[in-house]
Image (tube, rainbow, N blue to C red):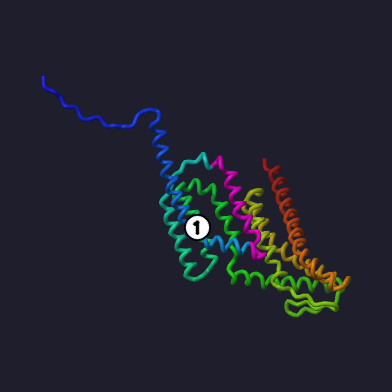
């Protein structure tokens, strides 16, 4: 009888711990890649984020910027169970998004455009999630990531393009209201001349600060509590007329106080405090719009068989 030579058996890991070992190795590799990306982001954006935080602190139009990343983080934390249930299925398309974000960063650096450099971080974060975790995870965290755009101050050209028309609207509406109330008024550009004082509607009085803050609040509020595109769109769009009316009301009240009680009462503390009153009034109006939309949706739901 001839001897038979058997082929060497293929060595495969067996045993209950083999799958756990492979999974642990995959997690270590993914963690190492994530750590490298985070380290690179820290190196790229440390100076940019430092300047951004300083502008939040120094510019009263963007003090809400501190709250935006916190809110986004809370949204991600609320969805943690949904996220942990999803498998990490990284996509190479994420690398293209990463390259796009880096390109925006370089373009902003070349042109000294802070808005591009700062907003490029959001694009890079989207690319990282897509590359490391995949499109299913990205869908869950898409809104928290995109909401970060509200922490980025507008470019100066856009800021003043919005602020100047708001100044004009506030001055015209206030002058019309004062005239309707029987107060003699002369409007000269953005300056309202009364018998005892002249009110200049400056950039700080344009309502741009309230508009920017309320837009970020309304978007987060609407997405969390309203259903349907039109409900969200109507609620967010309501911010614009509410802000215009509220700010014109501030100018009117300032003028009336100056006429009735004296110019000294219309300036100083009241002028500073009235900006908070405008925000509170506008927020209460938004609350009314929100309640109305919810009521309409509830009634339509009852009518649907």
> With 202 as the anchor, is 185 left or right in this view?
right
Whether residue 67 appears in magenta in the rendering, the answer is yes
The x, y position of residue 275, in whole percent, is 75, 64
Question: In which quarter of the view is residue 305 placed?
Answer: top right
Q: Main secondary structure of the magenta part?
A: helix
User: Front-most of 230 and 211?
Assistant: 211
> With 151 as the anchor, is 17 left or right in this view?
left
User: Front-most of 184 and 200?
Assistant: 200
Whether residue 104 appears in magenta in the rendering, the answer is no
Q: Residues within 10 Å of mark 1 (few under 14, many from 20)?
A: many
Q: Which residue is the extreme one toward the right?
A: 260
> With 270 as the anchor, is 293 left or right in this view?
left
Question: In which quarter of the view is residue 302 placed?
Answer: top right
In the rendered image, the quadrant that contains the N terminus is top left
The vertical placement of 110 against 6, above or below, is below
Q: What residue lies at 57% left-to-right and 64% top-to-bottom?
A: 51
Query: Residue under circle 1?
Result: 123
Question: In which quarter of the view is residue 17 placed?
Answer: top left
Magenta stretch, residue numbers: 57-82
Q: Dot 1 lies on which element?
A: helix
The x, y position of residue 153, in whole percent, is 60, 64
Q: Which residue is the extreme one toward the left?
A: 1
The x, y position of residue 219, in whole percent, is 64, 55
Q: What residue lies at 67% left-to-right and 72% top-to-bottom?
A: 165
The vertical placement of 253 against 195, above or below, is above
> With 260 as the anchor, is 163 left or right in this view?
left
């Amino acid at each position: 009888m001839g001897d038979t030579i058997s082929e060497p058996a293929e060595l495969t890991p067996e045993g209950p711990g083999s799958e756990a070992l492979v999974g642990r190795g995959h997690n270590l590799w993914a963690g190492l890649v994530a750590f490298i990306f985070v380290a690179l982001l820290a190196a790229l954006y440390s100076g940019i984020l430092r300047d951004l935080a300083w502008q939040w602190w120094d510019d009263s139009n963007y003090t809400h910027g501190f709250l935006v990343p916190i809110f986004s983080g809370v949204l991600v934390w609320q969805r943690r169970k949904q996220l942990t249930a999803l498998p990490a299925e990284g996509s190479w398309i994420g690398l293209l998004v990463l390259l796009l974000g880096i390109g925006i960063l370089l373009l902003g650096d070349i042109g000294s455009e802070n808005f591009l450099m700062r907003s490029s971080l959001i694009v890079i974060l989207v690319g990282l999630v897509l590359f490391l975790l995949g499109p299913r995870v990205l869908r869950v965290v898409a809104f928290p990531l995109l909401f970060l755009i509200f922490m980025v101050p507008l470019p100066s050209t856009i800021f003043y393009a919005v602020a100047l028309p708001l100044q004009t609207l506030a001055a015209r509406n206030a002058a019309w209201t004062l005239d309707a109330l029987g107060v003699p008024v002369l409007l000269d550009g953005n300056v309202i001349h009364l018998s005892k004082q002249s009110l200049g509607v400056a950039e700080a009085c344009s309502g741009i600060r309230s508009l920017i803050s309320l837009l970020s609040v309304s978007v987060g509020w609407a997405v969390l509590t309203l259903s349907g595109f039109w409900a969200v769109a109507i609620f967010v769009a309501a911010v614009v007329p509410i802000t215009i009316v509220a700010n014109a009301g501030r100018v009117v009240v300032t003028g009336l106080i100056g006429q009735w009680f004296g110019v000294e009462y219309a300036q100083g503390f009241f002028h500073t405090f009235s900006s908070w009153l405008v925000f509170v009034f506008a927020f209460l109006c938004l609350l009314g719009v929100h309640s109305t939309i919810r009521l309409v949706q509830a009634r339509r739901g009852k009518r649907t068989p």
